[in-house]
Amino acid sequence: MEIKNCAAIVSGGASGMGAATAKMLSAAGAKVAIFDVNMDAARAFASEINALPFQCDVTQEDSVIQAVADAEKAHGAARICINCAGIVKGRRIVNQQGPMPLSEFREVIEVNLIGTFNLMRIAASQMQGLSILGDSEERGIIINTASVAAYEGQIGQAAYSASKGGIVSLTLPAARELAQFGIRVVTIAPGLVDTPMFQKIPDAARAALITNVPFPHRLAKPEEYAKLALHIIDNPMINGEVIRLDGGLRMQAK
């Protein structure tokens, strides 16, 4: 799909992988809408990259519907939707304080999995009414963000791994269902990425995790996620797939 002049939505677009992707899309000529719960950060970043910020809580139906409608008024209907909004909360299922609070598990599932589905369904509904593009006969593309934790979740990652595993499992049935409309669905499963989310991990734990990355022997850069996202958009044969972006990493139990 040609990126130039396409309207694009990036959730979680004010920081990390979302920000890197929004910046790269804008540089490629897309009309970018940044969806984020942090409007101060969204406004500041949007002004840097010639994008528009929109308040959006992906867990709330009304918030997503309103943000998508507002973005459409500004840029036209989006043909590109990239879901980067997410949270990480580590806790063992049972520890010395007792069982994990159900509210914590529910919050992670709500933001990461249900939030992804919420924006995906609203964006797809809008895309299906668009005209087809060129020889590929595409109408749009949705890129979701999982994690290698979907496959090799570590101790303390039950909620996070379950949420990202749900996104992995969602990919193929969504791609099959939306194929009739010319809408592709692809998921990127990053490994260790140098984002604000990862920077919350203690230095010693960060260093230990990095030793497990075969090559390149470092954290991934948010821009490397963005480069992959742009290639997926450009290549119409990539569909219904989950692509790991991890330097060959296979996570250990802890």
Image: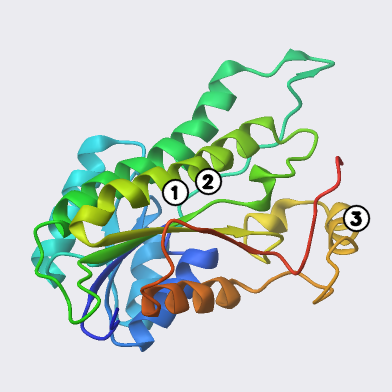
Q: Specify the quadrant that holds the C terminus.
A: top right
Up-down: is 163 above or below 47?
A: above
Quadrant assignment, res 40: bottom left
Please name the amino acid that badge 2 sits on.
Val
Q: Do the residues labelled 2 and 1 touch (CB within 8 Å)?
A: yes
Please name the amino acid that badge 1 sits on.
Thr
Up-down: is 100 above or below 60?
A: above
Q: Do the residues labelled 2 and 3 touch (CB within 8 Å)?
A: no
Q: Mark 3 points at which residue?
A: 204
Q: Specify the quadrant that holds the N terminus.
A: bottom left
Q: In this view, does 235 lie to the left or right of 178?
A: right
Labelled disc at residue 73: none
Instruction: Identify the element where label 2 is drawn.
Output: helix
Q: How crowded is mark 2: few (under 14 residues within 10 Å), some or many (20 or more)?
A: many
Q: Name the residue under label 2.
A: 168
Residue 253 placement (x, y as % from top left): 86, 40
Q: Residue at x 15, y 56 (%)?
A: 128
Q: Nearer the viewer, mark 2 or mark 3?
A: 2
Query: Which callout, 2 or 3, points at the residue further toward the start of the chain?
Result: 2
Q: Residue at x 52, y 74 (%)?
A: 228
Q: Is residue 228 left or right of residue 32?
A: right
Quadrant assignment, res 93: top right
Q: Residues within 10 Å of mark 1 (few under 14, many from 20)?
A: many
Q: Nearer the viewer, residue 21 or 243?
A: 243
Labelled disc at residue 171: 1
Please name the amino acid that badge 3 sits on.
Ala
Up-down: is 80 above or below 95?
A: below
